[in-house]
Image: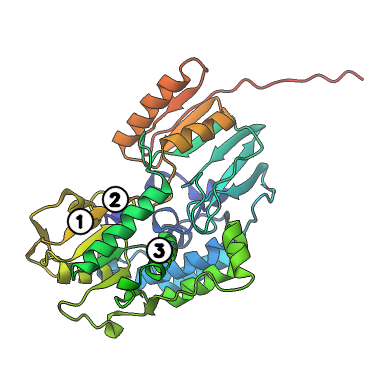
Amino acid sequence: IHLGKQGMESLPFFDEIDNPAEIDILLISHFHLDHAAGLPYFLAKTNFKGKVYMTHATKPLYKLLLTDFVRVSHVEQEKMLYTEEEIEKSMQRIEIINYHQKIEENGIKFCCYNAGHVLGAAMFMIEIADINILYTGDFSRLEDRHLMAAEVPPIKPDVLIVESTYGNQSHAPRHERENQFTSTVSRIVKNGGKCLIPVFVLGRAQELLLILDEFWQSDPQIQHIPIYFISRLAKKCMTVYQTYTNMMNQKISIQSSTSNPFSFKHIKNLKNLKGFVDENGKPAVVMASPGMLQSGISRELFDRWCTDSRNGVIIPGYSVDGTLAKEIQMEPATVQAFKGGYLERKISVHYFSFSAHSDYEQTRTFIDLLMPKHIVLVHGSSVEMKKLKDTLHKYYQEKNVSLYAPKNCTSVEIFFKQNKFARII
């Protein structure tokens, strides 16, 4: 779904599908709302009869995240896309696929590979009529504190469908981003302010918690300042993460053999704001969902703290157009309050990219290793897609690579010459 919209407007263009019953398979790359939250609607409200596949870790996280999405959505009943009961029914339709497992359905062969990005994320290699198509979904080729880097499939695809979220931009090195992030948090709280970090409750939240807990342990001067992770799903999420440490990187796997990597010394989990004592003039760090500040706990705290210049808000990843998280990066003088009216914005705004999306260097080196003849860019604004297409075109202009940057609902037609073999007996 589109996180900057509500109700039917937030759904993918399902009405462009002539007959969902003709679709054999739905492949879900990972649990994030912009990739999976339309599934209960599609299963309950259309005539789709095919199969749905996702990885082991994605399935329980999908249920947790979508259930919370329904509960915290502040929309009228008639605008709700689906109910918790329909989410539960969708779970019965979902089948599990393991990394590297090969499956065939109605002549369509497919398998999946670790995509990095978030726990359980998968890229899918699909073979139809001897043509191999690789869909990356959201992926990252950089290992972080708990996830492995995305794999390079051993099969060379004919067509690569790849995300273009960051266009031709390059991320700063991980240690630089971590140092800038922790120093900014430290500066805000040492000045007596409150630091708000809006996050999606699953994914980057766990990465940032690992970073903050280690940093707090290294600096005795700030250990008296509390860090809160406020979400009704906080403990449930940690339980799932602890269950799937075998899908994480070697560092986490080794640590989990002797201790729980997600048992934090300096971080308190709270279900809601009732357990949070918001004392005026006393610093604190609060990580809360949703990540785009569109509603919920993070939005309530932002509205409460935005008029005090001592406070700071850190946006730790990509923000969708139309959301408050995107709007405040332009540092407007005023912002619209969730309950109506306008508030003066004095809170400092900081942005650091921890979103675990591939940047230009990662994408180009990934393409170099696979060398597909056709590259289709998706999952990006028209501006970023064009930047990436133009940059890749210059780089590959002598290598006979076709590049496509289609708009939504636009068909891409690629023609292949079929090899014919005659066997003499």
Q: Secondary structure at mark 2?
A: loop
| Apparent side of residue 156 relative to residue 308 in the rendered image (left or right) | right
Q: Which residue is mark 2?
A: 320
| Apparent side of residue 45 relative to residue 353 in the rendered image (left or right) | right
Q: Is residue 75 above or below residue 133?
A: below
> Which quadrant, please, contains the C terminus?
top right
Q: Amino acid at mark 1?
A: Val
Q: Indicate the quadrant where residue 378 lies.
A: top left
Q: Nearer the viewer, residue 338 or 110?
A: 338
> Which quadrant, please, contains the N terminus?
bottom left
| Apparent side of residue 149 relative to residue 97 in the rendered image (left or right) | left
Distance from Cα at disc 1 to Cα at disc 3: 18 Å
Q: Nearer the viewer, residue 398 or 80?
A: 398
Q: Indicate the quadrant where residue 225 lies.
A: bottom left
Residue 40, numbered label: none
Q: Which residue is pictured at 53% across the width and 56% down the height?
A: 147
Q: Amino acid at mark 3?
A: Ala
Distance from Cα at disc 1 to Cα at disc 2: 16 Å
In x, y percent, where is residue 406? 39, 32
Q: Which residue is mark 3?
A: 205
Tell me if I can see residue 330 in this picture: yes
Q: Which residue is mark 1?
A: 349
Q: Is residue 354 above or below residue 408?
A: below
In x, y percent, where is residue 60? 53, 68
Q: Is residue 182 above or below residue 238?
A: above
